[in-house]
Amino acid sequence: MCLGVPGKVEETYREHDVLMGKVDFGGVCRRVCLEHVPEVRIGEYVLVHVGYALDRLDEAEALRVFELLASLDELGDLAGPEVPEDQAP
């Protein structure tokens, strides 16, 4: 099953002219492509699938989806390596 997971945008930056961001998924941060949501701002929530933000979400909806995924034990894929601090843009 393919899932979109909500995350909070912590920072944005350009990498090879592509809009990227550091996104927090409940304490686990990942690099995410933000090109599909160029209007996103730091502090907003995005719906992410395989490293690409597909849409913006309001905070209430993001938290509701995150809680649902946690209750279904579908957050295991986020347990991998985080964005190292020394590789932050």
Image (cartoon, rainbow, N blue to C red):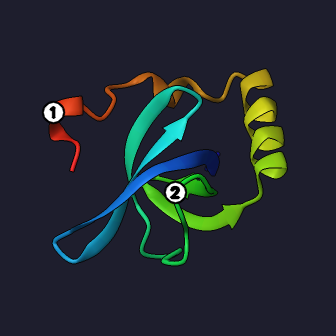
The amino acid marked with disc number 2 is: Ile
Which residue is depicted at the point 77% across and 39% down? 63
Say which quarter of the image contains residue 47. Answer: bottom right
Q: Nearer the viewer, residue 66 or 9?
A: 9
User: Considering only vertical position in the picture, is 14 above or below 3?
Assistant: below
Element under disc 1: helix
Closer to the chain start, of discs 2 and 1, is: 2
Decide: is 7 above or below 71.
Answer: below
Residue 38 shows up from this direction: yes
Q: Which residue is mark 1?
A: 86
Distance of label 2 from label 1 (alpha carbons)? 20 Å
Q: Are marks 2 and 1 in contact (CB under 8 Å)?
A: no
Query: Which residue appears at 75% of the width and 47% of the height?
Result: 62
- Residue bearing mark 2: 42
Q: Nearer the viewer, residue 43 or 37?
A: 43
In this view, 27 is above or below 41 = above
What residue appears at the point 77 percent right and 26 percent down from the top-left corner? 72
| Place of residue 44 in the rendered image (x, y in percent of width and height, measured from the top left) | 62, 56
Q: Amino acid at mark 1?
A: Asp
Q: Is residue 4 left or right of residue 71?
A: left
Q: Residue furthest front?
A: 42
Q: Is residue 3 visible?
A: no
